[in-house]
Amino acid sequence: MRRIVLATNNPGKVREFNAVLAGFNLEIAPQSAFNVPEAEETGLTFVENALLKARNAALHSGLPALADDSGLVVDALGGAPGIHSARYAGPGADDRANIAKLLAELSGVPAERRTARFVCALALLHHPTDPTPLISQASWEGVILTELRGANGFGYDPVFFVPSEQCTAAELEPAVKNRLSHRGRALARLAQALALDPIPLAAG
Ligand code: ITT
């Protein structure tokens, strides 16, 4: 069994990764097990920040590392909150505060202009100085509602309406969200890249 460290401190992401990766031949170690310090997310793109987080976790754990950088891109806000989604309402902001700020910024914007997408970039580094990481990215289209609906998921899920399902991401069963979502589909692409990868992940 190949062992990798999952480079995230977000419990919502951990739940989704563990559910999707359960079918892979991988043993997933949380980065909390290695006291990995917070990575400085200085990149300007999701991909750059995913690489920074994976490199930081690989360095401090000695294991191959998988990181996710993700966020919500809202057309009427010029792409905000984007790479700043986790702390949109300020340092230490929680999901409620971030959603409240999002709805305030969109106040008065009509339904047809409330289009948005979740974006997820994944980076898998074989080791900290790996010059050939595996990268995948996917997005998920939706519309931002004016009020919260549903209790599943995390982050902006309660205001992210999914047209194909006629409900919010927070009203979807977790398995359905993982099949449709930016993260679920980026992971499926990463699995394809991993299957073709000539570089072995070190056996744990
Ligand atoms: P790590 O860096 O430790 O992984 P984080 O939450 O700080 O955790 P990001 O910088 O990638 O991670 O921020 C992603 C934010 O985007 C996340 O906190 C949510 O607010 C939002 N987000 C990402 N995926 C989401 C999803 O599936 N559903 C709802 N919100 C999501």
Image: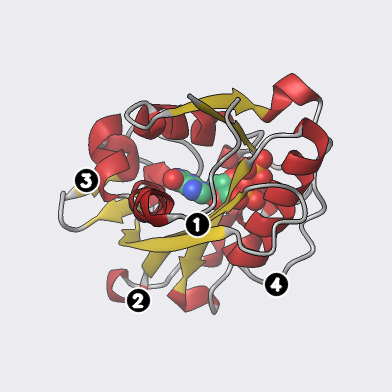
Q: Secondary structure at mark 1?
A: helix
Marks 3 and 4, how far apart at CA: 32 Å
Q: Is disc 4 in contact with disc 1, using a CB cutoff of under 8 Å?
A: no
**Residue indicated by mark 4:** 44
Q: Which is nearer the N-term, disc 4 or disc 1?
A: 4
Residue at the far top: name it. 33
Could you say which quadrant of the image residue 170 lies in? top left
Residue 88 in percent (x, y) is at 66, 55
**Residue indicated by mark 3:** 167
**Residue indicated by mark 2:** 113
Q: Which is nearer the N-term, disc 3 or disc 4?
A: 4
Q: Residue at x 26, y 32 (%)?
A: 175
Q: Which is nearer the N-term, disc 3 or disc 2?
A: 2
Q: Could you tell me the amino acid type at mark 4?
A: Leu
Q: Secondary structure at mark 2?
A: helix
Q: Is disc 3 in contact with disc 4, using a CB cutoff of under 8 Å?
A: no
Left/right of residue 24 with respect to residue 167 in the rendered view: right
Q: Residue at x 51, y 36 (%)?
A: 13
- Do we see residue 100 in this rendering? no
Q: Is disc 3 in contact with disc 2, using a CB cutoff of under 8 Å?
A: no
Could you say which quadrant of the image residue 144 lies in? bottom left
Q: Could you tell me the amino acid type at mark 2?
A: Arg
Which numbered marker is on residue 81?
Answer: none
**Residue indicated by mark 1:** 103
Q: Quadrant of the C terminus?
A: top right
Q: Which is nearer the N-term, disc 2 or disc 1?
A: 1
Left/right of residue 114 with respect to residue 48 in the rendered view: left
Q: Is disc 2 in contact with disc 1, using a CB cutoff of under 8 Å?
A: no
Marks 4 and 1, how far apart at CA: 24 Å
Q: Secondary structure at mark 4?
A: loop
